[in-house]
């Protein structure tokens, strides 16, 4: 199977981002395929928003527990 090629233009910032994301052992083409085939995690943003009060409460309990633990040590 013969693979064709296409030239694309990237500005300097985009090129540097891709260069940093590229693993040493892969080509730029392989890096683009790896990066773009990842699942879109942005769909997860905000999922826990409705639980923010509960999460704040849990965080407060954790902090309280840590303070009490150290109070007993000292």
Image (cartoon, rainbow, N blue to C red):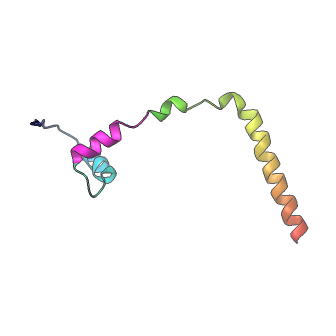
Left or right position of 14 against 50: left
Q: Quadrant of residue 25?
A: bottom left
Q: Position of residue 48 (x, y in %)?
A: 65, 32
For the C terminus, the quadrant is bottom right
The residue shown at (88%, 65%) is 71
Q: In this view of the protein, which residue sits in the foreground, 74 or 6?
A: 6
Q: Position of residue 4 (x, y in %)?
A: 10, 35
The residue shown at (39%, 37%) is 38
For the N terminus, the quadrant is top left
Tell me if residue 24 is in the magenta stretch: no
The residue shown at (71%, 31%) is 51
Q: Position of residue 45 (x, y in %)?
A: 55, 32
- Residue 25 vertical position relative to residue 29 in the rendered view, above or below: below
Q: Position of residue 57 (x, y in %)?
A: 80, 40
Magenta: predominant secondary structure element? helix
Left or right position of 47 against 12: right
Find the residue positioned furthest to the bottom: 74
Left or right position of 5 against 71: left
Tell me if residue 30 is in the magenta stretch: yes
The residue shown at (85%, 62%) is 69
**Which residues lie in the magenta part?**
28-39
Find the residue positioned furthest to the right: 72
């Amino acid at each position: 199977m013969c693979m064709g090629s296409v030239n694309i233009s990237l500005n300097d910032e985009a090129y540097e981002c891709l260069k940093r994301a590229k693993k040493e052992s892969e080509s730029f083409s392989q890096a683009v395929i790896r990066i773009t085939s990842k699942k879109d995690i942005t769909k997860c943003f905000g999922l826990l928003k409705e639980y923010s009060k509960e999460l704040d409460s849990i965080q407060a309990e954790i902090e309280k527990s840590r303070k009490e633990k150290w109070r007993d040590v000292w």
